[in-house]
Image (cartoon, rainbow, N blue to C red):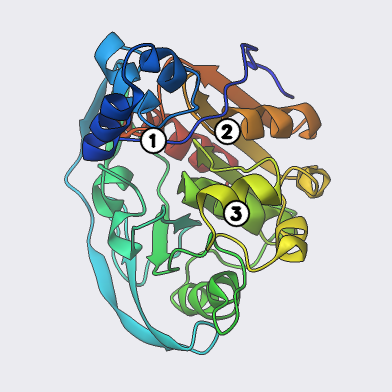
Amino acid sequence: MNQGVRRGPSRRRLIGVGAGAVVGLAAAGAGGLELVARGVLPGRTWLDQIDGACSVPHPPVTFSVPGPSIAGTFYSAARRREVGYTIAYPPGHQPGSRLPLIIALHAYGGNHSSALGRLGLARGLAVRLGGRALPPMAIAAADGGNGYWNPHPGDDPMGMVISELIPRCLRLGLGARPRLGRRSIGTFGISMGGYGALLLAERHPGLVGAVAAISPAIWTSYEQARSVNAGAYASASAFAAADVVTHAGALKDVAVRVASGDSDPFRPGVEALADVLPPSGAVRFSRGCHSSPFFYSHEPASLAFLGRHL
């Protein structure tokens, strides 16, 4: 159910940090702070950091000794290039163990090694939340580029995940085919990766049993996406085909956890998703921005959620 959804003013704004934020403030001049605050000029996230809107408490976590990881490259026919990948195992397990599988999709500008943000893949599996270890599961990630996990001419990152990465993991005994109605593959992602995790689950609900998305980068229209990131979608029709709000009904048999910050510029898109998610989905809004502190604060709970449902 869409429990935990808390409404507030929807504010569309671009993310501006560092030097870009300072330039925006300088250009604003007298009265410009209001324009920045409303998202007309870049720099809103920078202001949120100043006034504390981005400060969030860290969950009480400790760590076991991380399990092993295997990393390498393979040629992806779907992406027409060599891609890097990592498969991480939980504490007490190693290659050869048969385990549920999490497919982690990285954020914009990231790669296979950064798909779990600050935690890291192996360390994330070693989290002890409230003193309790996570259910044992493996995590796999591969390089998907910056095309928002949807097809572009000559590049199909989602096709790579489905036809190349997941079969590679299945051959290792990870994410074995469903038995007794349970699916042992879940998806996870932050920002662009959170959007991709939802998209993967919508495209393949017979394969994916659970999805956890932190601050998913959900655009409300093709025009909005193109104005901010012209490379996100190849065309308006590509956006329509990959719009996770329009196709949310496909998640009716998938367990869904979505977390988004009150000051996240993608909040309007997440609110639109919350309005149409089937009862199996839950969206949580809480204090925070589209920034590392918020991502990190929700990573342990998101992993625990996936572990419970696989």
On the image, the x and y values in percent for residue 80 come to 48, 88
Amino acid beneath label 1 = Glu
Q: CA distance from mark 3 to mark 1?
A: 29 Å
> Which residue sits at x=37%, y=33%?
295
Residue wearing tag 3: 226
- The numbered dot on residue 258 is 2
Residue visible at 36% across and 72% down?
A: 96
Q: CA distance from mark 1 to mark 2?
A: 11 Å
Quadrant of residue 27 in the image? Answer: top left
Q: Amino acid at mark 2?
A: Val
Q: Is residue 262 above or below residue 70?
A: above
Q: How many marks?
A: 3
Closer to viewer: mark 2 or mark 3: 3
Q: Which residue is mark 1?
A: 299
- Contact between marks 3 and 1 (CB within 8 A): the answer is no
Callout in the foreground (3, 1): 3
* 252 on left or right of 58: right
Picture layout, residue 194 above or below residue 16: below
Q: Secondary structure at mark 3?
A: helix
Q: Which amino acid lies under the numbered mark 3 shown in the image of this protein?
A: Arg
Left or right: 209, with 214 as reference point: right
